[in-house]
Amino acid sequence: MPEADYSTARPGAGWPACHNERVSDERGPAWTGALQDFWRARRRARLREVLAGLTRNSRPLLNFEQVRRQLRAVESAGRELTEVPLDRIVGSVGRYNDFTREFLPRQDSDSGRWARVRMAMTGLEGVPPVELYRIGDAYFVKDGNHRVSVARQLGHRYIHAYVTPLHTRVHLGPDVSPERLIIKAEQAEFLEKTRIDELRPGAELSVTAAGRYGQLLEHIDVHRYFMGLDEQRDVSFEEAVVHWYDTVYLPVVELIRRHDLLTGFEGRTETDLYLFLSEHRGRLWRELGFQLPAHAVASELTGRNLNATPAARARLLEQARAGKVPGLYHDVLVGLTGSAADDQVFGQALRIAHTERTELYVLDMAGVSAEARASLQERARAAGVAAQFVTTFGDSTEELLDRSEFSGLVVMQSARSVQGLVRRLRRPLLLVAGDGQPLSHVLLAFDGSRRSEEAMFHAAYLKLTRTARLTVVTVQSSARTGRRILDSAAAYLEGRGVEADYVRVTGPVVTALLETASERDCDLIALGSYKYSAWLETVLGGVPDELIVRSDRNLLVA
């Protein structure tokens, strides 16, 4: 319907004679004022276009027909008369090139018509409602572009309108840009193909860049292919969509929410981050040889250990206290050195991976025989643990360090050669000695330092998840200092429902620790990696270095 031209309105056509006579006087002060308002609006329009060119942030008025086709919008029956916020009108049926996004006039030739509408809208009789289409929360002018333009320049916030709604699968907001419209169009196509909004009501898969819905479709196609291989049957696309959403997409989104990962990716959505993690998992798989889980990749990309925050650790210990194994040591990395102890080292790592219900990553640092590898793989299968094997071809220490960034625990043989790893690893290191039996009694070496507090958290976790005994020992010559240190440990542990024995001993630190471990039959000593400066202890040596050389017990260095 063409927009009404008030300059030709006649009595009997819905307009009183006095109105027609007033607007026809184009030489009075009202007309002059209306024209001045138009040219002010034109200057603002030119300024907006110059600024948009400089900032490359153009937001033109949208073409309704193009939007309707792209979003597959279908007109609903009926219309309603209502007040519409002017800032939600973002497009037009036929005049989208004649106005800016703020409905400032872009054509000098519009001056007469704009001025007449301006005079009509400020007259006593007013103007009829405009006609709009609505898609989501965005409105498009069917009839009344000049009335909308004048109303905005007059500072009005709302305008009366007959609104015809259109239905689409995607939500359209008033802040939509041409670039965002492309994304919305892709979303509409994605929803039409997958019907995931029907199959999983409430599913919210929104992205912030074009092309990503195509990537999601590729994920579903690949998932469908492997489902067919696993189940040896034809899998329908609809079934693959649901299974992918439930078993692949949602677990990653739950991880994102649980660890508040979006704070590290400002302006992105959960679906953006899902795709980002998936992409980096593929790259890391090619680089490291291990297919890493999403949480390990997220931990590295965000530069923070997801289980290191106080809130996360409190939650882990609470779950452990309730009889669950929440999986602190996700993705156990074990290094095989080709020594006779490899069997015990692998066994201890396998036991932990089984208890934690996680995967086992095996780094072959010495080129074990094919027969030995097959035997280890069979042990993992029998234990119900997924194990991945990679052989190093360069500096085995650096290879281990690279892969350790994506693991929750590193397991190695206790030997002098690993001393240099202690201060370079950013993950806890379990050094296996002896016959590799289950860890049943933990001796926590506690001196009140930050690193020993880290060891205390791990000792508490082991106590709760493995019903192990726990003894806390501090080596202090001063009874008062020893009591203060042990009291602080007791406050932490008892506050988390962890029972322990507390012992103060004197003498050389390493000797005292080893004697206490022997007297109490402890099979694991837990301690911090260093007390003062990592650099200083690298030069001068420290307690972990001496324990590695002298101890016949397992060591957990946090």
Image: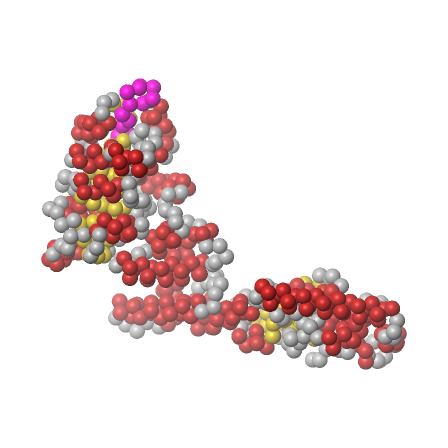
From the viewer's side, name the closer residue of 224 and 25: 25
Nearer the observer, 500 or 407: 407
> In the displayed structure, does residue 340 sit left or right of residue 454?
left
- Can residue 478 be found in the magenta stretch? yes
**Residue 308 seen in the figure:** yes
Q: Residue furthest front?
A: 539
Corner quadrant of residue 73: bottom right
Q: Is residue 272 left or right of residue 117?
A: left
Residue 340 pos. (x, y %): 11, 46
Q: Is residue 108 placed above or below 398 in the rendered structure? A: below
Residue drawn at the location 42% of the way across and 70% of the way down:
214
Q: Residue at x 39, y 49 (%)?
A: 303
> Quarter of the image holding residue 89?
bottom right
For the record, the magenta segment spans 467-482
Question: Quadrant where the N terminus lies?
Answer: bottom right
**Does the segment drawn in magenta span residue 183?**
no
| Number of marks drawn | 0
Query: What residue do we see at 17% from left, 36% from top?
Result: 549
Quadrant in the picture for residue 544: top left
Residue at 29% x, 43% y: name it.
424
Residue 401 pos. (x, y %): 27, 49
Quarter placement of the C terminus: top left
Q: x%, y% of residue 432?
A: 19, 41
Q: Please, which residue is most extreme toward the top here?
A: 479
